[in-house]
Image (cartoon, helix red, strand yellow):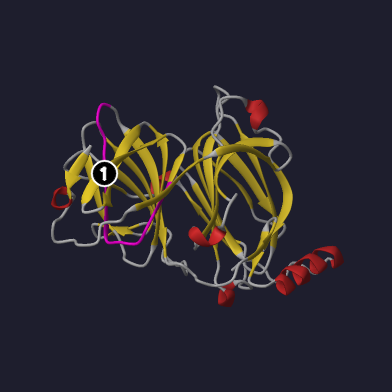
Amino acid sequence: MTLKLEQIGDPSVKSVRRVKKIVKARKTMEGAGVILNRAIGFDDPYQYDPFLLFDDFRSDNPEDFMKGFPWHPHRGIETITYVLKGQVEHEDSLGNKGIIGEGDIQWMTAGSGIYHQEMPLPDPSGKMYGFQLWANLPQKDKMMPPKYRDITAEDIPVVKQDNGVSIKIIAGTLEGIRGPVSDVTISPEYFDITIPPGTDYIRNTVKGHRLLLYVFEGSGYIETPENGSVNQVKIENRNMIIFEDGEQMKITTRDGEARLLLFSGKPINEPIAWYGPIVMNTDEELRIAYDELQKGTFIKAHTA
């Protein structure tokens, strides 16, 4: 279906974001044998800057996830874990430990270095649904002290718009309401958005920031400019949508509800040197990190 350009969203907004690429998450194995679907992390990392990796670990089979993610290091990144069903038991080398459950978030800034483990636990029906996003840190913050933010579902504000769209604000600000994560360098937005059937969702976006969407329930259509008109591109479960720059995007649902995650952030625009769980700016910094792991000098500071 093709529409005239002026039919998309607010006509005063000139720069509508074009769909650059749609990535279908594909199965992979991580940790001690966790089967998950990865939507970011296989190809050129610069196209997702400031984000690095996104894993979808939804499963109805405990054998897919019970082996978990035993002790492993991180440096130079932030990991954001969001649980929908079941629980994740976490513990780190600095003595922090706890459990996050349905609707909870753990936002961990690895900074200068940390060891931790994450062990998924099923709900009573055997299900475990959740996501993990990695965000990069700029060079000036790579070696900052590690930091944890454990955020309960009750701490996450929900905005309900007149058209029935419901938005959980994990990070960022919407309609004057700020999410609980606010002190992050890349100025991220992280929203969990539910769009009812037959509804338009229009989001004005920050020009110059990266914008990604991940669909995890239902389907919809994104209106994307093409040669002076607007094409409707279908998006569905386990699709990661990467946008070009612009000031606005629009999603339309038809017969069914859609639920998706929205991520946006300011690109860091620095070199990426990445091997395993450590992301630095140069190969020399990576070599130093792995030398320190062998020597036992990797941990630099207590959590902030």
**What count of labels does the image hold?**
1
Residue 235 in picture, x, y percent from top left: 37, 38
158 left or right, relative to 84:
left
Residue 286 in picture, x, y percent from top left: 72, 68
Q: At x 62% / y 70%, what residue is drawn?
A: 145
- Residue 296 vertical placement versus 167 (above, below): below
77 left or right, relative to 238:
right
Question: Which residue position holds label 1?
Answer: 231
**Could you classify mark 1 by the number of other residues whose Cα lies within 10 Å: few (under 14), some (14-19), or many (20 or more)?**
many
* Residue bounds of the magenta highlight: 241-255
Identify the image quadrant of the C terminus.
bottom right
- Residue 172 vertical placement versus 256 (above, below): below
Q: At x 56% / y 59%, what residue is drawn?
A: 45
Q: At x 68% / y 56%, what residue is drawn?
A: 277
Q: Amino acid at mark 1?
A: Asn
* 77 inside magenta stretch: no
User: Residue 33 is drawn in which quadrant?
Assistant: top right
For the residue pair 43 and 68, the one nearer the viewer reads as 43
User: Residue 134 is drawn in which quadrant?
Assistant: bottom right
163 left or right, relative to 123:
left
- Residue 37 vertical placement versus 230 (above, below): above
Q: At x 30% / y 61%, what residue is drawn?
A: 246
- Residue 249 vertical placement versus 60 (above, below): below
For the residue pair 284 and 153, the one nearer the viewer reads as 284
Residue 196 in picture, x, y percent from top left: 26, 34
For the residue pair 297 and 138, the one nearer the viewer reads as 138
226 left or right, relative to 104:
left
Residue 175 in picture, x, y percent from top left: 23, 57
